[in-house]
Image: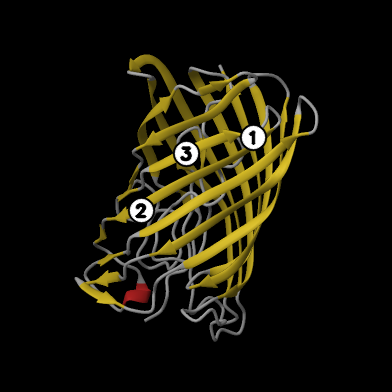
Amino acid sequence: MKRKLLSVCVFGTGLFGIDTAQAYDLPVVNLGLTTFLDGAPPAGAGWYFQEYFQNYSANRFRDQNGKSLGLPRQQLDYQVAVTQISYFSDLRLGNATLGMNAVLPFVTSMDVDDGLNNAALKAQSGVGDLLLGPMIQFDPIMGPDGPRFAHRIELQVNLPTGKYDSKHDINPGANAWSFDPYWAATYWFTPKWTASVRAHYLYNGKNDDPGPGFGGADDMQAGQALHANFATEYAVTPQLRLGINGYWLKQITDTKVDGHEVSGRREKVWAIGPGAMYSFSKEDHVFVNAYFEQDVENRPEGSRVQVRYVHHF
């Protein structure tokens, strides 16, 4: 059974988040687009606009044992732009603020080379699936020198609104809904040094028009998965923060095809790399992050570089 190979990984949710295109049964998820200070909005309540630009490049497609697939060439390159609108309201629920998040990715360029004139793998670019999620931002726990801990919960839903064609192995849209709630938190060791984490649980609905790699099946349902982003950074100046960022994903149940579990398709990956954040003001911030993937199973193995701009109105 030919393996599907890509998904526009889009920022999970909350104030930050998304991921990119990659090998998959799994849909759009946030792998590495949320990094520093993820547990709290940088400028308090109100409207936020974010734009992400990411480049991903892989020259290996890994199987269930982490071995390269038997294709003459294994090259995948793509660029994705993601627009995110977030709103942190004045509505209160105990010691927390209510908010809402919307994320829309667009795969601007997609190039896959299987060495067989794309006889094995066909791909297309276009608009990805819309991500929506209500969120609860808890008030920070304060210390003598400022915040010590801040966290947020979001109930993210991915809607099957993106471009999808079952004749293609790689599509911007998943043609299935998914539920991907998360918890994000930031801890301040000192006013200059923080660590952040975002932990997701992913549950997927059915795709009732699976691609050519599923041998004419009536439907497929990707397995459940856990994934997380992690980062730590240090403020070397009031404007510039430097640090390390990473992500991790592990599929924990088998994909189902026509209601039957199919073994050997579970995905796994982790990645790490350097990152930086520059604050032009309290309202405007730029993040730059790089990732190098490791221990990959049933996915492409590559590297990615992303730039994210955050503006508070």
Query: On screen, 98 above or below 301?
Result: above
Spatial CA distance of label 1 from label 3 is 17 Å
Crowd class of label 3 (few under 14; some 14 to 19; many from 20; radius 10 Å): many
**Position of residue 7 measured from the top left corner of the image (x, y, whole percent):** 46, 58
Crowd class of label 2 (few under 14; some 14 to 19; many from 20; radius 10 Å): many
Question: Three-letter amino acid code at disc 2?
Answer: Leu
Quarter of the image with the N terminus in it: bottom left
Q: Nearer the viewer, mark 2 or mark 1?
A: 1
Quarter of the image with the C terminus in it: top right
Of the residues under marks 3 and 2, which one precedes in the sequence?
3
Residue sitting at 60 percent across and 59 percent down? 271
2 and 1 marks in contact (CB < 8 Å): no
Question: Three-letter amino acid code at disc 3?
Answer: Ala
Query: SS of the residue at dot 3?
Result: strand
Query: SS of the residue at dot 1?
Result: loop
* Residue located farthest toward the left when viewing the structure as drawn: 259
Question: Three-letter amino acid code at disc 1?
Answer: Phe
Query: On screen, 62 above or below 131?
Result: below
Q: Nearer the viewer, mark 3 or mark 2?
A: 3
1 and 3 marks in contact (CB < 8 Å): no
Residue sitting at 32 percent across and 67 percent down? 253
**Position of residue 161 measured from the top left corner of the image (x, y, whole percent):** 34, 46
Residue 66, by quadrant, is bottom right
**Position of residue 310 measured from the top left corner of the image (x, y, whole percent):** 60, 29
Query: SS of the residue at dot 2?
Result: strand
Name the residue beneath numbered marker 2: 202
Residue 184 circle label? 3
Of the residues under marks 1 and 3, which one precedes in the sequence?
3
* Residue located farthest toward the top when viewing the structure as drawn: 90
Of the residues under marks 2 and 1, which one precedes in the sequence?
1
Name the residue beneath numbered marker 1: 189
* Residue located farthest toward the right when viewing the structure as drawn: 237
